[in-house]
Amino acid sequence: MTDSADSSPGGVDRLLAIMAKLRDPDDGCPWDLEQTFATIAPYTIEEAYEVSDAIESGDMAALRDELGDLLFQVVFYAQMAREIGAFDFDAVVDGICDKMIRRHPHVFGQADIRSAEMQTVAWEAHKAAERAADENRAGVLDGVAQALPALLRAAKLQKRAARVGFDWPSIAPVFDKLDEEVTELRMAMADESGQDAVAEELGDLLFVCANLGRHAGVDPEDALRRANAKFERRFRRIEALLAAEGRSPEDSDLAEMDALWDRAKREERE
């Protein structure tokens, strides 16, 4: 006998049938049946990053696969919500359709928006109005997800505060604040104030770095991701150069590896 998931139509309907089968209390998958919204959440974050990695590498086949994995996360949540009578996949789709139509009145209505810049302003205005109408979001900073990477969340918190005028008028005072935080971090470390004090000052420094990126028009999370990639690329080059001599970093020292690092930098510029 053919399973309903195998014989159902293609596309989303087939995926929904597969998900329902996996969560079937009688003969579903034990692992899938044990999952909750909370246990699935970390996988969703991981899948989103894997989508980003596929885009960064320009691998369209990988991107297709990773988008499928991310879509499966949405279907998983919708199935669990349907089981408790909260909502289903169709409600999720209807909700995002309604939101997109509401936030694009220049496409689906009569509003006159002629540039991407005007659209960005209108989009933010729509989101602000929606937040104001939400009785559960009374504060300016409400709704900035706690699970975001800390650097990205810092930039979003600062952006929200800036909307109501809590912001430096230019980038120059941000540099001054950066110098101030570096000094305070040095003092905390010199005074041996303890790890908590050092961690607090380091956090303040990173928070100002996020603000500096925002004022410079640079996504701090993306900037750090690029720096990570650069460090990894150059260190792997150090390993390769040492391996060509039958050695590893453990067989080297800082002075030699620093010289090889400079060589890797020069090679990238040539």
Image (cartoon, grey):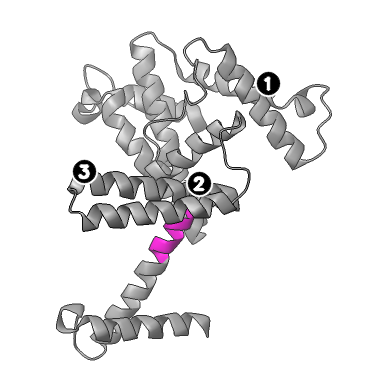
Q: Earlier in the sequence, mark 3 or mark 2?
A: 3
Say few, some or many: other residues with alpha carbon within 10 Å of mark 3 (under 14 / 14 to 19 / 20 or more): few
Viewed as shown, does residue 109 lie left or right of 101?
right
Q: Secondary structure at mark 1?
A: helix
Residue located 45% across and 29% down the image: 14
Residue located 44% across and 56% down the image: 179
**Hey, which quadrant is residue 5 in on the image?**
top left
Which mark, residue 102? Answer: 1
Viewed as shown, does residue 18 lie left or right of 120?
left
Q: Amino acid at mark 3?
A: Asp
Q: Earlier in the sequence, mark 1 or mark 2?
A: 1
Provide the residue span drawn in magenta.
Answer: 222-229
Say few, some or many: other residues with alpha carbon within 10 Å of mark 1 (under 14 / 14 to 19 / 20 or more): some
Q: Could you tell me residue 264's position as x and y percent?
A: 40, 81
**Hey, which quadrant is residue 15 in on the image?**
top left
Residue located 62% across and 48% down the image: 170
Name the residue tied to disc 2.
211
Badge 1 vs badge 3, beta-carbon distance below 8 Å: no
Q: Amino acid at mark 1?
A: Arg
Task: Examine the rendered structure and indicate whether residue 40 appears above or below residue 24.
Answer: below
Q: Secondary structure at mark 3?
A: helix
The residues bearing labels 1 and 3 have C-alpha atoms spaced at a distance of: 46 Å
Q: Secondary structure at mark 2?
A: helix
Say few, some or many: other residues with alpha carbon within 10 Å of mark 2 (under 14 / 14 to 19 / 20 or more): many
Q: Amino acid at mark 2?
A: Asn
- Residue 4 in view of the camera: no
Which mark, residue 196? Answer: 3
